[in-house]
């Protein structure tokens, strides 16, 4: 079976286009006739075109901000009464390069008769299960513009929350890093130099001995300390990437917030 790109006219006079599989050109024309459509153009899709399309669609990654804007524009176009295919082609004209790749994929899938949520699932990241589910709901409910607006609002709130969290974390992280660097310099450089002339003349107090031992430990094993920290970070990322573990963590955080709220109310 070979892929053919077609253009046809339905019995109501509506122009249609898409991709069909067939043994040859006559087979595709027969398929269109069985659907009540008259073929006006049927051409075989070359293998080089498929390869170029696949290569193009994987060149650029769509960011969350671009995806939110794309979904909101699609919702606005649907709200204005444009059919889905015309809406996709309209926002495709003004889309960013990364969004254009996604919209080309959506247009090809919709032309082939697939729903938009299936096209999003086939594309993969950044279309996660939540977005695919919302697109499925919009397709099933018949209120695509409303649900797409809700999805865009949800994504905007998520992005705003991430920006607020990042802004709240950066300053404390910088302060913590400066304190850690100052402490390491103090323990490994300044304290040993100050204590060294007195080390053989008096019995040092145990806090000073602990500091000296800590300084010696860091100087001798610093590379292994860095390796251990890197291993812990890698292990944490691997653990949190598992959906079940992420769900347990988020559930624990929600339960903790509920306990805190109950405590404040009491």
Image: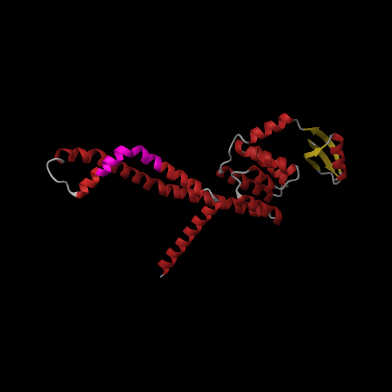
Q: How is the image coloured?
A: secondary structure
Residue 174, horizontal then vertical, whole percent? 36, 44
Foreground of the two, 108 or 151: 108
Instruction: Residue 96: tell me if it is visible.
Output: no
Foreground of the two, 79 or 156: 156
Side of 11 relative to 168 (left or right): right
Instruction: Residue 196: tell me if it is visible.
Output: yes
Q: Going 67% across and 55% down the picture, which residue do you hit?
A: 137
As drawn, 194 above or below 142: above
Q: Quadrant of residue 197?
A: top left
Side of 43 relative to 61 (left or right): right
Q: Going 72% across and 40% down the picture, which residue do you hit?
A: 108
Q: Which residues are magenta?
A: 213-228
Which quadrant holds the C terminus?
Answer: bottom left
Q: Going 18% across and 41% down the picture, which residue do you hit?
A: 195
Which quadrant holds the N terminus?
Answer: top right
Q: Going 64% across and 37% down the picture, which residue do you hit?
A: 101
């Amino acid at each position: 079976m070979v892929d053919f790109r077609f253009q046809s006219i339905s019995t109501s006079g509506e122009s249609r286009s898409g991709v069909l599989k067939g043994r040859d050109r006559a087979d595709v024309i027969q398929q269109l006739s069985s659907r009540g459509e008259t073929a006006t153009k049927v051409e075989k899709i070359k293998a080089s075109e498929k390869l170029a399309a696949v290569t193009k669609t994987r060149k650029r990654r769509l960011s969350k901000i671009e995806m939110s804007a794309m979904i909101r524009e699609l919702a606005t176009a649907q709200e204005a009464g444009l059919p889905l295919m015309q809406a996709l082609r309209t926002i495709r004209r003004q889309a960013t390069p990364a969004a254009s790749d996604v919209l080309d994929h959506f247009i090809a899938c919709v032309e082939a008769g697939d729903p938009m949520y299936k096209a999003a699932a086939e594309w993969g990241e950044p279309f996660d299960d939540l977005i695919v589910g919302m697109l499925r709901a919009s397709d099933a409910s018949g209120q695509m513009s409303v649900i797409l607006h809700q999805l865009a609002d949800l994504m905007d709130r998520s992005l705003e929350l991430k920006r607020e969290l990042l802004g709240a974390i950066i300053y404390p992280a910088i302060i913590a890093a400066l304190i850690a660097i100052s402490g390491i310099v103090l323990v490994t450089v300044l304290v040993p130099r100050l204590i060294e002339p007195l080390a053989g003349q008096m019995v040092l107090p145990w806090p000073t001995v602990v500091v000296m031992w800590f300084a010696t430990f860091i100087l001798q094993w610093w590379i292994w300390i860095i390796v251990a920290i890197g291993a812990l970070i890698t292990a944490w990322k691997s653990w949190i990437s598992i959906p079940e573990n992420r769900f347990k963590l988020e559930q624990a955080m929600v339960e903790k917030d509920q306990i805190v709220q109950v405590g404040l109310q009491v």
